Amino acid sequence: MKIIEDKYTNNIFENIKHIDEYGNEYWYARELSKVLEYRDWRNFLKVLNKAREACKNSGFNINEQLVEVNKLSRRNNNAIANTQDYKLSRYICYLIVQNADPSKEVVALGQTYFAIQTRNLV
C-alpha cells in the first residue's frame, strides 16, 4: 500500500466528486474513467456495463445509481459536440472499481476508497 500511496492519494477521487443542489454526491463517468487510467471510453463502458448488471442483480434501482447525461464539449477543431456521460452514485462507483482492471494501481486504491466510503454511509 505504501507504493500506491506514494503515487496516488484518495484526493484523486475526492477531487472529481460533485455535490448537487440537494447535497447528494456524484461522480461523472468520463472523469472517473480518466482517473482509472482508461484511455478509451469504449473500454470503460465495458466496465460500466458490468457494474450496471451487478447493481440490477443486487436489487438496487439502477436509475438512482446511474443517470445518463449529455454534455456539450468542444472538439479540437472548435466544433461543439454532444457527449454522452453518466452521473454516478458512490455505490455504482464502488461496483465500477470492483470490475475495473485489477492490474492498475489506481484501481486498487479506488477499491479501497469506495469500499470504505460506501460502508461509512450504511
Image: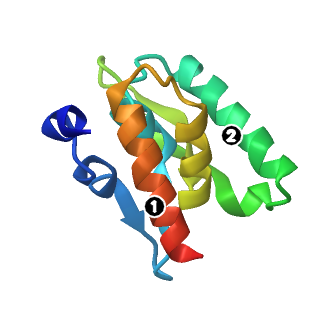
Residue labelled with disc 1? 116
Q: What is the basis of the colouring in this image?
A: rainbow
In the picture shown, does residue 77 fall above or below 7? Answer: above
In the picture shown, does residue 61 fall above or below 3? Answer: below
Q: Where is residue 16 shown, x and y percent of the image?
A: 33, 52
Quadrant housing residue 78 = top left
Q: How many marks?
A: 2
In the rendered structure, find residue 43 and report the number of the disc placed on it.
none
Nearer-the-camera pick, 5 or 26: 5
Q: Where is residue 107 shown, x and y percent of the image?
A: 42, 33
Circle 2 SS class: helix
Q: Give the residue at x 54% y 49%.
A: 93
Q: Amino acid at mark 1?
A: Ile
Task: Assess disc 1: are there few (<14), some (14-19) or many (≥20) residues with their C-alpha within 10 Å of its C-alpha.
Answer: few
Q: Is residue 45 left or right of residue 109?
A: right
In the rendered structure, find residue 51 and report the number of the disc placed on it.
2
Q: Amino acid at mark 2?
A: Ala
